[in-house]
Amino acid sequence: MNSTFDIEMAFARLRETMQAYPKAAMFQLAEEGYRSPFEQLVSCMISIRTYDEVSLPVSRRLFERANTPLAMSKLSVAEIEGLIRQSTYAERKAHQIWAIAQEIVNHHNGTLPCDVDILLAFKGVGPKCAHLTLGIACEQPYISVDVHVHRVVNRWGYVATKTPEKTTKALEDSLPKDLWIETNKLLMPFGKQICKGQYPQCPKCPLNNICPKVGI
């Protein structure tokens, strides 16, 4: 970890700057009222390998038909697939979403608990979706590291890691817990819109004067 990088200042500047940019899909849906653990989990599954510009309207369309485990369990897999067909791997996701809804109805009284082990036991749910769901819907302190978060914190020199999994562990060891959920909220869109992979927009970045630009 780079103890000289002012992480608190970085987050403070990004809170202001990122207001002008589209929010990450799950945070946007939460602002629109789709903030139950089930809605957040399903929207994350829909977003896998799918751009936010696609997954957002797809999630809204599905939730207009069914936004609870009971309502979703009453749809057929084919109906769910038809509603999410623009999402990548729609057929597979439809089977998984329907099965999760059935499981919640049959074994959890129709309400998805805020329990990481239960979420990770569902087929099609990995740590990223489980942690984002628990962070946004349940306000539990979890960090979910995607390629954007991984790239950004390594460019800052805040961590020096080779994979998102190792970045997650490094951040859990060093980042103040009150910033964990905000890491996803701020750094995913920041990495997508400004601190891009091939062409980072350093001149318009609010952190240009404090960022060591590791690897650039």
Image (tube, grey):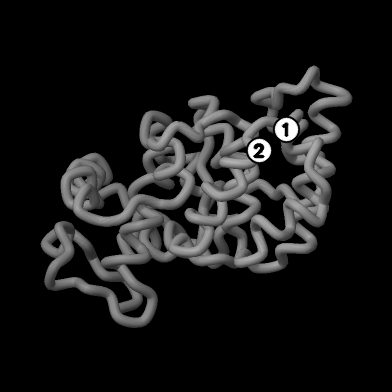
Image coordinates of residue 101 in percent, x first then y, are: 78, 36
Q: Is residue 209 above or below residue 185?
A: below
Q: Which residue is rendered at x = 43% and y = 57% of the image? A: 149
Rendered residue at 25%/44% (across/down): 11
From the image, tell me which residue sits under label 1.
71
Is 202 on the left-hand or right-hand side of 102?
A: left
Quarter occupied by residue 33: top left
209 lies above or below 37: below
Q: Nearer the viewer, residue 182 or 47?
A: 47
Name the residue type under label 2. Answer: Ala
177 to the left or right of 202: right
Residue at (77% x, 31% y) in the render? 118
User: What is the quadrant of the C terminus in the image?
Assistant: bottom left
Q: Which mark is residue 66?
A: 2
Which quadrant of the figure has residue 175?
top left
The reply to whether the C-beta atoms of the residues labelled 1 and 2 are less than 8 Å apart is yes
Q: Residue furthest top?
A: 109
Q: Residues within 10 Å of mark 1 (few under 14, many from 20)?
A: some
The residue lying toward the viewer, choosing from 207 and 185, is 185
